[in-house]
Amino acid sequence: MTTLLVKNAHVLVTMDGARREISGGGLFARDGLIEQVGPSETLPASADQVIDLAGHVVLPGLVNCHHHLDQTLTRNLPVAQNINLFRWLKAHYRLWAARTPEASRTSTLVGLAELALSGCTTAFDHAYVFRNGCKVDDQIAAAREIGVRFMVSRGSMSLGQSRGGLPPDDCVENEDDILADSERVIGAYHDAKPGSMLQIALAPCSPFSVSAELMRESATIARRHGVRLHTHLAETIDEERYTLERFGKRPVDYMDELGWLGDDVWFAHAIHINPHEIGCFAGAGVGVCHCPSSNMRLASGIAPVKAYRAAGVKVGIGVDGSASNDGNHMLGEVRQALLLARLKMSLRPPEGPDTTLSTSDPSRDGEWMTAREALELATLGGAAVLGRSDIGSLEPGKCADFFAVRLDHVGYAGGLADPVAATLFCAPQAAAWTVVGGRPVVANGEIVTIDLPAVVAEHNRHAARIAALAE
Ligand code: ZN
């Protein structure tokens, strides 16, 4: 048995039912699970490992609900900097299909390292391009190596251009192979137990890259095994046009027809959604992953996050693929959610005559996304979206997943009247400590589980080979 004592935090944010923030707080964990949380003087005096976090704010580990770690290999490519989703995807499909298992391993390590350095302790990866010998197994091995709690999809694309899909035919897979490998990956890896470090989801990529049949079959397999379902939905007006033309339905109605509105489903983006559809999500228990940077980067739109919250829809936050964000900074993404919700407040609905609304009316005070609400989305919200009751807050019985930020950064100077809100209102800083299941992944500001400089060097060699293919 291994014990961990964290003590003397300037403030420890619990996200418990009372939303306690404990001055001088700490926690005591055994074998990766929290046994006690409270003022440091109330905790055991010693443990196998003791971390003194005086001068730090301690928060529950952030939960990243949507990502494509392999895209770290194709960040910031000049050919894809100034185009919207469909054109951006077409610029990338063959590049992603050209990655090797080794490239996939290093991109997973790089992406998860950057996430851990920004406070993320649980990451979901929506892997869906499996060509060139790449398998989910490559990413799982990498996640185990670095020690971040991991959920990964056996995702898929099956609908090539010749059948009316967006991806080239040589980037998609045979549907029988996809379904067989989905069964294999679930059987080999999915761990549903509390404290699980590894879970599997099934995630056909989008309405415009898989068939209706594959959507239905994936749902059948997922429900047989009790794993979750995920896809991209209502990300762009182009997608809405596609489903209207091809199926005569809006994206949400199409999902309903396929049996994809349920409490075991979460959608990435869900931007172009009307009030009736928000009610459908709330009624069915569907979750949403909000990806603000990617949505701005690709000019996709702004998800109605406050309306989702008001309706009772589960909402988490994701950095999305590294090539549509070009970063994996989870704390920075939470800040983007805070800011973008405020921009959304100022915009009239599309049918309105003007482009802006006054935000001065006190009756609109409830529309402001607060720092604590944004942090809640990224912790409790993300846990709910991924169907986990064992993460998202610092309470007895939960996983010892947390991160700590030093308050003596120059970026926080003058902003310490509210240190918790400073983590978002001030420029996002790196985590000094990120601990997953009681085990430090980041200590004193450094990744301690892998040789990060060597991994970055190898990753950049793989990325250069792939970038050359784009030219
Ligand atoms: Zn995505």
Image: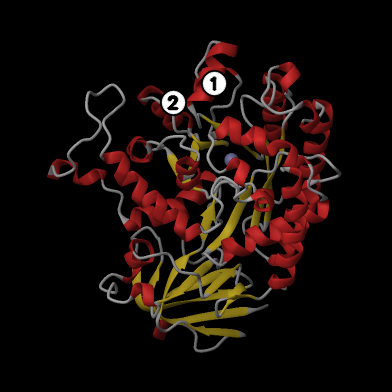
Q: Position of residue 180 (x, y in %)?
A: 83, 33
Residue at the spot x=39%, y=80% of the render?
A: 408
Looking at the image, is 253 positioned above or below residue 278? above
Looking at the image, is 21 positioned above or below residue 217? below
**In this image, 133 relative to 391: left or right?**
right
The N terminus, quarter of image: bottom right
Q: Nearer the viewer, residue 45 or 181?
A: 181
Identify which amino acid the numbered label 1 is placed on. Asp
Q: Are marks 2 and 1 in contact (CB under 8 Å)?
A: yes
Instruction: Residue 231: name its quadrant.
Output: top right
Q: Which mark is residue 390?
A: none
Q: Nearer the viewer, residue 55 or 70?
A: 70
- Is residue 410 visible in this depiction of the protein? yes
Q: Quick check: which quadrant has ligand 1? A: top right
Residue at the spot x=40%, y=77% of the render?
A: 409
Q: Nearer the viewer, residue 57 or 184?
A: 57
Q: Position of residue 227 (x, y in %)?
A: 66, 40
What secondary structure is found at the residue carrying circle 2? Answer: helix
Q: Where is residue 50 in the image (x, y as percent from the top left)?
A: 55, 85
| Direction bottom: furthest residue | 45
The C terminus, quarter of image: top right
Color encoding of the figure: secondary structure
Looking at the image, is 1 positioned above or below residue 171? below
Residue designated by label 2: 280
Residue at the spot x=43%, y=64% of the render?
A: 428
- Is residue 230 visible in this depiction of the protein? no
Q: Where is residue 23 in the image (x, y as percent from the top left)?
A: 33, 77
**In this image, 251 relative to 456: left or right?**
left
Mark 2 or mark 1: whose residue is earlier in sequence:
1
Residue designated by label 1: 256
What secondary structure is found at the residue carrying circle 1? Answer: helix
Identify which amino acid the numbered label 2 is placed on. Cys
